[in-house]
């Protein structure tokens, strides 16, 4: 039933020797939603996911998945794509998907039948009998993703599903995830690439340093930071009119958070001062900005930022992206 | 789904995958071909290290008849000496096959004491009669397998004008018929051989004996020598009686059963080979799964003990498949070969072949569970084949030590060493499999099975914990010191991961 709790974790704590991997993580995923689990590298996402799946036992706290505290006993209702992809190189794609289904209780014959259908539906019909070792990384990752939901699970947990994929395959993977949501599955996926979270997720959980820093929708996450005003004038703005936090970028543009008085009142004052308004926009903060604000280390995820910017560029010109691919 | 059903399902899926993956791999084909390779290798080594590059040389000797009659004496001596050898073998076979029985009158005399007339009689058909009468058949099959090869076949050749040149011509490489040529020359004997490696010991004995016999005959001593031989007193054979304390039980004499010893050694070697090969396959499989990260998908879907058990079971089934394939491929040939071999050449187990094989199979499973679990636990701690080799080295050395000690205990016969080796759990499966070939008692085997299964359960428990501890680890394996320090963690059943 939509709206019921599919995954709930409270106060999770896990350490390995002296290393505290997860300090205090709370996480709730409602049935039928896509929950983004965001955090930097080493934030404790994989450890948390492993605790949700019953691979690791938490030192403290509790978690409940689909109403059970023993996830292995309901393995047939869960699909999982680990971050470190693992497939048997000598197995065919059909057998791989059927095997992954069999691990979660799907009879092999049914698994093979569904594998063929899934492979056909996802553009891999010609690769049904191909060995994994002959496939590209993107194709193998698609096969593994198909294997993680061949048994039509109620809950799908994906650990960094987009990492290492080219934009075309990332888009294909997004479509596959969206299709599973349409089927009614709850999806939890971890990522540090904000573009995917922004496009796919109903809600987000942001973790940093092994703790939950934020839980809410994408819009709520963006609201962590105020909108930014960017304006350019013909002449200098009298300093007393500039709100707190205003700064001028090299192009001459002024940037500052929306002031308490409101945008309209500020603009009127600037126009009245004779500065001459040339250009004006109000920008909502991106999820990336909000994420950096939340985790508190803007330099920590340069790679993710670069990846996200590339995503944005590719999304703006998908034709070029396909040609490049 | 109940946890038991989850466990059983997961175990079956893992086992099935491992069986299919192993059976269709090149490695398995090589494993299946091991007996053929071993046979081929043995033949190659035999060919390369054989003492005589000309196999026919020692058994094919020409004697040049220079008209002195010596060649006939050589031919006669070779015939009677051949009869003496065959008689000696029949006598030994009788003792091997019927250790409880006394030698019959026909075989009572030791072979070296037989006189020429006795030997002539044996060569004239008496040997065949004795062989049939006491079912000692070496017959054609024995000859086909070369059991008569020690006896030189002598061919008499009439001398030409230059016997020495004739002899050299007979040994020319292109002639390729004789290994040696014997001729009488100026009152002495000359023996030419094809190469320095040609075995001439036997023909020297025959040549000298023939020389003595001819000279004795010339001097009219043959009958006197025969009379002397016949007049020799019969030797009274007995065991001296020892004073013993009143009421003391007779001192037990360890019995040595050559047949059971051979069977035991064979069983131990087969078991050792199977265990070593399977343990290797198990290790490489484990390292592959850790290397390609499949292991995380497995542990997220199936309880870790079920993965562990599935892998162990898979390898047992793989080995049984191997044994069945060997049976089908080579069994017919082996049976045909065994049927052709003389009775008793391969001894029959006292409890029968079925009982022996079933007991051996049980010990194989016990040994595999112990060593397989050990290797699987070790494999889970490693990330590469090199690490596996380093970490499994102590277990491999231990296995070798166990093999050596077991073989030594088998050859030492019943005694303290055999008892210790029979109960020490790492050597017990081998030793008890060897002991299954001797005697018909079943109770010691039932006790041994119980003991081994209890011990195997302990090893599986510890190894499964190690497996759980190490299965998601990456990087170099922990040292023994680290394992000791973290023992509380892994015995408790915690999984350790390298990635956060």
Image (cartoon, rainbow, N blue to C red):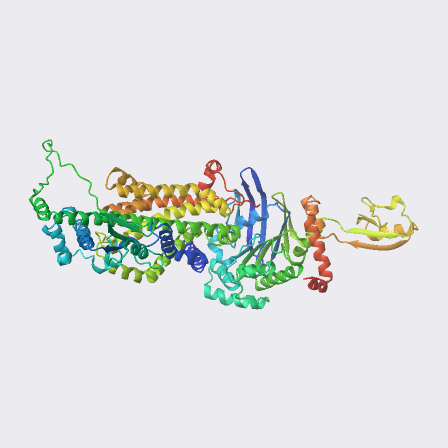
Q: Is residue B199 above or below residue B236?
A: below
| The N terminus of chain A: image quadrant | bottom right
- Residue at 75 percent across and 49 percent down: it is A226
Q: Quadrant of the C terminus of chain A?
A: bottom right
**Residue in the picture at 49% in, 64% down:** A111
- Judged left or right of residue A70, residue A125 is right
State whether residue B394 is above or below residue A123: above
Tell which residue pokes out farthest to the front in this image. B161
Instruction: Out of B165 and B421, give the one closest to the viewer.
Output: B165
Residue B325: where, in percent of width, then height?
Answer: 36, 60
Of A93 and B305, the residue lying toward us: A93
Q: Residue furthest right?
A: A274
The answer to whether residue B114 of the structure is visible from this angle is: no
Residue B68 visible here: yes
Picture quadrant where residue B256 is located: top left
Residue at (59%, 47%) from the top-left corner?
A: A26
Give the x, y percent position of residue B94.
16, 51
Where residue B60 sits: x, y (%)?
27, 56
């Amino acid at each position: 039933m939509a709206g019921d709790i599919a995954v709930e974790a409270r106060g999770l704590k896990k350490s390995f020797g002296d290393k505290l991997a997860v300090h205090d993580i709370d996480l709730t995923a409602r049935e039928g939603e896509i929950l983004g689990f965001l955090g930097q590298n080493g934030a404790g996402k994989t450890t948390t996911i492993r605790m949700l799946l019953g691979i690791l036992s938490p030192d403290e706290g509790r978690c409940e998945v689909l109403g059970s505290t023993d996830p292995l006993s309901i393995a047939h209702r869960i699909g999982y794509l680990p971050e470190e992809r693992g497939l048997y190189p000598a197995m065919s794609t059909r057998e791989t998907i059927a095997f992954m289904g069999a691990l979660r209780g799907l009879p092999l014959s049914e698994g093979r039948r569904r594998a063929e259908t899934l492979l056909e539906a996802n553009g891999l019909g010609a690769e049904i009998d191909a060995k994994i070792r002959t496939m590209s990384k993107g194709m193998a990752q698609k096969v593994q993703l198909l294997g993680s939901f061949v048994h039509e699970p109620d809950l799908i947990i994906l650990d960094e599903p987009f990492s290492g994929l080219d934009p075309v395959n990332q888009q294909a993977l997004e479509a596959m995830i969206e299709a599973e949501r349409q089927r009614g599955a709850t999806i939890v996926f971890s990522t540090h690439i904000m573009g995917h979270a922004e496009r796919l997720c109903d809600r987000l959980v942001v973790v940093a340093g092994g703790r939950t820093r934020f839980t809410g929708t994408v819009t709520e996450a963006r609201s962590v930071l105020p909108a930014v005003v960017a304006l350019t004038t013909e002449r200098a703005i009298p300093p007393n009119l500039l709100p707190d936090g205003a700064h001028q970028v090299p192009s001459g543009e002024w940037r500052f958070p929306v002031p308490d008085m409101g945008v309209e009142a500020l603009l009127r004052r600037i126009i009245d001062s004779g500065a001459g308004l040339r250009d004006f926009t109000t920008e909502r903060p991106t999820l990336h900005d909000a994420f950096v604000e939340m985790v508190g280390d803007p330099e920590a995820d340069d790679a993710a930022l670069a990846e996200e910017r590339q995503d944005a560029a590719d999304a703006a010109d998908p034709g070029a992206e396909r040609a490049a691919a | 789904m109940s946890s038991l059903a989850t466990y059983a399902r997961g175990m079956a899926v893992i086992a099935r995958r491992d069986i299919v993956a192993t059976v269709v791999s090149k490695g398995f084909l090589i494993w299946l071909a091991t007996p053929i390779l071993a046979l081929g290798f043995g033949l190659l080594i035999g060919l390369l290290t054989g003492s005589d590059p000309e196999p026919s040389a020692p058994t094919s000797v020409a004697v040049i008849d220079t008209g002195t009659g010596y060649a006939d004496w050589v031919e006669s001596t070779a015939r009677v000496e051949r009869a003496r050898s065959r008689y000696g073998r029949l006598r030994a076979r009788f003792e091997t096959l019927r250790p409880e029985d006394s030698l019959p009158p026909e075989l009572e005399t030791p072979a070296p004491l037989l006189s020429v007339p006795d030997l002539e009689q044996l060569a004239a058909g008496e040997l065949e009669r004795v062989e049939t009468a006491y079912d000692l058949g070496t017959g054609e099959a024995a000859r086909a397998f070369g059991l008569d090869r020690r006896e030189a076949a002598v061919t008499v050749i009439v001398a030409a004008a230059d016997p020495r040149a004739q002899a050299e011509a007979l040994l020319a490489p292109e002639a390729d018929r004789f290994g040696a040529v014997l001729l009488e020359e100026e009152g002495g004997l000359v023996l030419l051989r094809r190469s320095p490696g040609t075995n001439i010991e036997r023909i020297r004995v025959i040549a000298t004996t023939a020389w003595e016999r001819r000279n004795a005959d010339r001097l009219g001593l043959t009958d006197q020598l025969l009379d002397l031989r016949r007049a020799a007193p019969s030797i009274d054979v007995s065991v001296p009686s020892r004073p013993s304390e009143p009421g003391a039980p007779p001192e037990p004499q360890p019995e040595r059963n050559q047949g059971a010893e051979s069977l035991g050694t064979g069983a131990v070697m087969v078991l050792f080979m199977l265990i070593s090969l399977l343990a290797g396959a198990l290790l490489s499989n484990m390292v592959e799964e850790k290397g390609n990260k499949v292991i995380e998908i497995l542990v997220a879907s199936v309880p870790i003990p079920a993965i562990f058990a599935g892998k162990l079971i898979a390898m047992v089934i793989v080995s049984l498949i191997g044994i069945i394939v060997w049976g089908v491929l080579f069994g017919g040939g082996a049976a045909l070969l065994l049927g052709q071999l003389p009775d008793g050449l391969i001894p029959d187990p006292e409890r029968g072949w079925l009982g022996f094989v079933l007991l051996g199979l049980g010990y194989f499973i016990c040994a595999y569970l112990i060593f397989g679990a050990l290797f699987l636990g070790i494999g889970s701690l490693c990330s590469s084949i090199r690490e596996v080799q380093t970490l499994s080295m102590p277990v491999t050395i231990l296995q070798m030590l166990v093999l050596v000690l077991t073989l030594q205990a088998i050859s030492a016969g019943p005694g303290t060493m055999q008892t210790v080796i029979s109960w020490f759990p790492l050597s017990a499966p081998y030793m008890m499999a060897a002991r299954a070939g001797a005697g018909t008692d079943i109770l010691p085997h039932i006790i041994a099975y119980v003991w081994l299964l209890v011990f195997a359960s302990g090893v599986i428990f510890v190894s499964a914990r190690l497996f759980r501890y190490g299965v998601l680890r990456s990087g170099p394996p922990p040292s023994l010191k680290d394992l000791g320090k973290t023992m509380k963690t892994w015995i408790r059943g915690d999984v350790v991961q390298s990635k956060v």
